[in-house]
Amino acid sequence: MSQKTPNAPLAQLTLPGQSHTAEGPHDQTGMYVMHHGFRRDLASFSAAVEQTPVSEAEVWAALHARWLRFAEVLHHHHGVEDEALWPVLMQYAEAAGSTEDTAMLEDMEAEHAVIDPALTAVRVAFEEMRDHPCADHRNALDIRVTAARESLHEHLAHEEGQALPMLQRTLTVEENAEFEKAAGNGYPMRIIPFVLCWTMHELPEEARGAIFELAPPGSTLIHRLLHRRFERKEREAFRYV
């Protein structure tokens, strides 16, 4: 843990659904865009489960496949926080003797531990609906998606309201850069085109340029080539939303 170098506050992004914007010296565009994607997807899944006719077997199969992608992106996001962010913030909390920050960071980890099995429960419910579409399986899936959505919404609000403000007031430029680097690494090559298109999907225009600036070279071209296919598959899965 190195000495913090003071930095001037940066203009931060505020997106639809965001519960709090943490002002400070570190650009949190990437974090808020990911949170936007998670909220957007959970709203779409909730609506799809309620509105898709039970008889639409192909749509349920597409929704199941889409949930697997969503869960993979979220698992990576949480894994990076568990490995590259919470431990660094915990060092600051312990060095300052802050029981409040220590408890908050322990809550962050505990909330991740609740969300992971909730995602698995939804996956299993989607598999049951895909393999045997019926009203009972749809009702069970609806309950599980609702539970996962509520847990994640509470966690994102907690993170935006407490963890990210702590990040802003404690991390050095170097430490934040290391975290951002970890967040960008680790995705399997097969999913990177999806993640790029997923990130940009329904993103307000003011955030799109910022994301392309953060993305690796060639991302603009990849998105231009693949986004129509991505959008077509979105329409297949969320046909009734």
Image: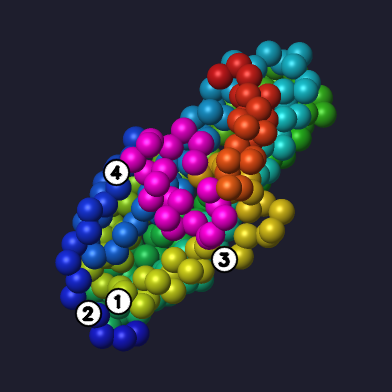
Give the mark nearest the N terminus, 1 or 3: 1
User: At which x and y percent is residue 178?
Assistant: 44, 74
Q: Are marks 2 and 1 in contact (CB under 8 Å)?
A: yes
| Mark 4 Cα shell of 10 Å, populated few (<14), some (14-19), many (≥20) | some
Q: Earlier in the sequence, mark 3 or mark 4?
A: 4
Compared to residue 26, the image places residue 207 above or below, namely above
Classify 132 as above or below 190: above
Callout 2 environment at 10 Å: few (<14), some (14 to 19), or many (20+)?
few
Spatial CA distance of label 1 from label 3 is 20 Å
Q: How far apart in space, not on screen, are marks 2 and 1 (Cα)?
A: 6 Å
Q: What residue sits 20% from the left and 71% below the top?
A: 7
Residue 172 is tagged as: 1
Residue picked out by circle 3: 185
Rendered image quadrant of residue 140: top right
Circle 2 sits in a helix, a strand or a loop, which is it?
A: loop
Given residues 160 and 171, the one toward you in this image is 171
Q: Earlier in the sequence, mark 3 or mark 2?
A: 2
Relative depth, front residue between 4 and 61: 4
In the image, which disc is placed on residue 14?
4
Q: CA distance from mark 4 to mark 2?
A: 25 Å
Q: Disc 3 versus disc 4: distance between alpha carbons? A: 24 Å
What are the residue bounds of the magenta stretch?
A: 200-220
Which residue matches tag 2?
5
User: Which residue shows up at 76% across the image and 29% down it?
Assistant: 61
**Which label number is shown at residue 25?**
none
Neighbor class of circle 1 (other Cα within 10 Å; few <14, some 14-19, many 20+) is many
Q: Is residue 201 magenta?
A: yes
Q: Amino acid at mark 3?
A: Asn
